[in-house]
Image (cartoon, coloured by chain):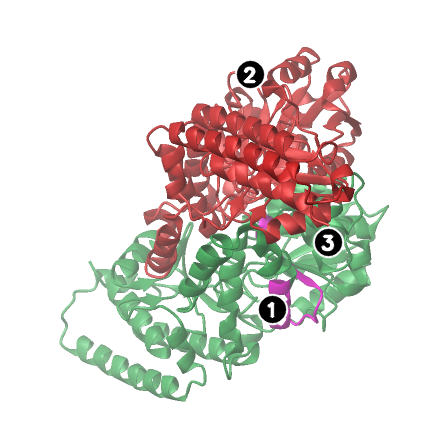
Chain colours: A red, B green
């Protein structure tokens, strides 16, 4: 808090600050020049007056999406109408788009479907996991630091399946697992702190105890390697409007590991998940494979905007590996600039310094965070505020530059030194 | 079946047919000239080569929607990005759009919310109804002739709440109701036959037995007066992409009667239904009113396309009453033309002749219905086929003309007389 009460205009200080700024700006230019993903930024609609560090809440618009969606609306809906369910591939879009997301989360084909919101998919996955675990296992562990919706939905799943719900910090999960544990619902990256949890180790621990894992990938899909197949994850859900840039409220995805699909017993067995949806049978017979995770009629406009957005991942040089490398460089650089610019003690990083524990965001604890974020946004640096005291900055490597990062840290330092 | 085996080209027959055609065409012109909704057709994207009678599956595109959606994508998402959740009213869109639908189904403000698919809303409503009914009531009655998804979802709701599920034909519901009945899930209009069920009487019968009603309005919302408030319906769900023309897979709506809202205990308590969604509290506290029916982040693109589509209902002279009057005239005329044109015995109407029992569609049983519908579509008359033997024609009074109706019946007669 010291800088806020320090008299401004001391002779030595601006000089020192300017020199620091110059040094970091020089590095930012160099990093941007060397960035293999630099050209991808041109695929997105961005304005130079804004540094957009809220892609972990809503990804920016890929520039080609409006024309594609306009074609969906005018031609596919307007001209072909009902024929588009077949002719424009609407009916199979949930699994087709799932197939586009699969490689981004380390899944072989046929295991991912896009449908409904994240919350609804958490419900499907947790209930299905409890059913897979079978009799005698009546406890669900849930990440005690979870984004709230997972906790609320897990509580509902527990109530409806006769289980107890037990909130546990991810680090304490191995000790909490036992013979009664049916399912464990965990976040890959903590939405508030940006901490990356150890998916391979926690999955292995759950399996050793005979429990099933449900991973929430909202803050990791499209930001870092997930390795669902490699690490034997059972079920996973994730959001598509953050690092996958699918658009506001674009539908979420559900992963069910291939060898578990026959045992995936959905609590939402809508007609879209029937083996013969147009047979109009009174009896429910579940479809095989990923479509078993579907429920009702897919929201085509949102789904096809997402599909178009995913084209960015087909660009030369774009890969989850390249994204992860740049993400770590961006967050390292941001932490360094903040340390160099911001008066000591004014902010504290909640995001781990260790790469193995860091997602693609930086969370800074700051006493008057709500007001500070308002001022940052007024000056064109867009992050978000999470109550009670967190400034959250997301770094989407596909379009955030090192110059953005330097500017964000500089504006943050200026705002924190305002009267 | 006689006409298919009758030698064609008899001297008398074409003359007789042509005269019949002329008479009905004359009437069609007259009806169209007198139609108070005739001008509304111009609000939709239609082509004169097609008679679109599948609006009960996917409504036609209102012509102003593409420009509105383009603005949502380019400006609200592309330029304002995250700010649009507040500044463009995205966050409150589910209840705002619900408020636009409310008067179309006879609901006072504050009782309808738009969110998720019909299937997901059936799940919310049936589980909530069982919970309202309380201890000692452990049976759910479901329309035995329902669109399948309602039956599948009701079975899941029954399984998760420890209830028995009992399929009953709507007419037999009063006799089936008893002290164990918790909830009754019924369709207002039968998706296959177009039969309109007696919502006031069935609701009253359920209430007399102490049970709660869930009405599926998929085939009545936007087609005929529903009167939810007037008839004391407890819960209702409905589709927005049929007679409300919201676009492919546009989200469904949920109605919870005002005095039941405090007791609406959702099985899908996602963060969007929390009293303070951005408080990020670990404990779930449900919101008051319609937002309690929300779950996760709304699919904004589909939702705002729907919102724009609803503007058609603000046109001078457009009302549910006017729509219903024209709907009955259209279906009457279609049945009359079919009777006049189609060889006797070749088709049989499954749709009741009585207005009080007819929705806004006509279902014709026809032996080779699948092949016949293919031929109809090839000739520009678009209805749909429902296995095993039903030709289904939907009549959306906002854009279907009497000339369309006459042409559809004429083409049907021609197709049925092809070798």
Q: Is residue A267 visible?
A: no
User: Label 1 near label 2: C-beta < 8 Å?
Assistant: no
Q: Which mark is residue B195?
A: none
- Expressed as whole percent of the image width and height from the top left, the position of residue B112 reads 67, 62
Q: Nearer the viewer, residue A330 or A5?
A: A5
The local crowd at label 1, few if under 14, some if 14 to 19, many if 20 or more residues have their Cα within 10 Å, is some
**Residue B100: mark:** 1
Q: Chain of mark 1?
A: B
Label 2 crowd bin: few (<14), some (14–19), many (20+), radius 10 Å? some
Q: Secondary structure at mark 2?
A: loop
Tell me if residue B31 comes above or below residue A382 in the rendering: below
Q: Quadrant of residue A1?
A: top right
Give the residue pinned by disc 2.
A231
Element marked by disc 3: helix
Q: Secondary structure at mark 1?
A: helix
User: Local crowd at mark 3 within 10 Å, few (<14), some, or many (≥20)?
Assistant: many
Where does the C terminus of chain B fall, quadrant-wise? Answer: bottom left
Q: Which residues are magenta?
A: B96-119
């Amino acid at each position: 808090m010291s800088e806020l009460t320090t008299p401004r205009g001391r002779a030595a200080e601006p000089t020192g600050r300017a020199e620091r700024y110059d040094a970091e700006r020089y590095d930012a230019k160099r990093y941007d020049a060397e960035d293999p993903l630099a050209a991808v930024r041109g695929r997105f609609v961005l304005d130079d007056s804004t540094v957009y560090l809220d892609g972990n809440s809503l990804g920016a618009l890929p520039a080609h999406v409006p024309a594609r969606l306009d074609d969906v609306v005018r031609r596919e809906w307007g001209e072909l109408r009902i024929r588009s369910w077949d002719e424009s591939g609407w009916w199979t879009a949930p699994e087709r788009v799932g197939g586009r997301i699969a490689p981004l989360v380390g899944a072989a084909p046929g295991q991912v479907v896009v449908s409904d919101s994240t919350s609804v998919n958490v419900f499907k996955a947790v209930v299905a996991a409890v059913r897979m675990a079978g009799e005698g296992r009546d406890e669900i562990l849930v990440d005690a630091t979870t984004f709230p919706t997972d906790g609320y939905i897990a509580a509902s799943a527990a109530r409806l399946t006769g289980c107890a719900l037990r909130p546990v910090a991810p680090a304490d999960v191995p000790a909490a697992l036992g013979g009664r544990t049916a399912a464990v619902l965990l976040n890959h990256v903590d939405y508030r702190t940006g901490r990356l949890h150890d998916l391979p180790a926690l999955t292995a621990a759950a399996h050793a105890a005979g429990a099933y894992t449900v991973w929430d990938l909202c803050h990791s899909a499209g930001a870092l390697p997930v390795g669902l197949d490699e690490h034997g994850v059972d079920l996973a859900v994730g959001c598509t409007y953050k690092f996958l840039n699918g658009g506001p409220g674009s539908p979420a995805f559900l992963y069910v590991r291939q060898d578990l699909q026959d045992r995936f017993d959905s609590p939402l067995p809508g007609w879209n998940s029937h083996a013969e949806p147009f047979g109009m049978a009174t009896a429910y017979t579940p479809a095989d494979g990923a479509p078993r995770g579907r429920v009702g009629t897919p929201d085509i406009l949102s789904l096809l905007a997402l599909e178009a957005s995913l084209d960015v991942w087909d660009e030369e040089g774009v890969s989850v590996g390249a994204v992860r490398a740049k993400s770590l460089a961006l967050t390292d650089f941001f932490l360094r600039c903040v340390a160099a610019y911001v008066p000591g003690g004014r902010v504290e990083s909640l995001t781990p310094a260790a790469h193995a524990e860091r997602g693609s965001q930086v969370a800074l604890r700051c006493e008057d965070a709500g007001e500070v974020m308002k001022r940052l946004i007024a000056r064109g640096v867009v992050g978000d505020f999470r109550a009670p005291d967190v400034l959250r900055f997301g770094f989407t490597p596909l379009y955030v530059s090192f110059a953005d990062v330097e500017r964000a840290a500089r504006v943050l330092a200026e705002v924190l030194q305002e009267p």
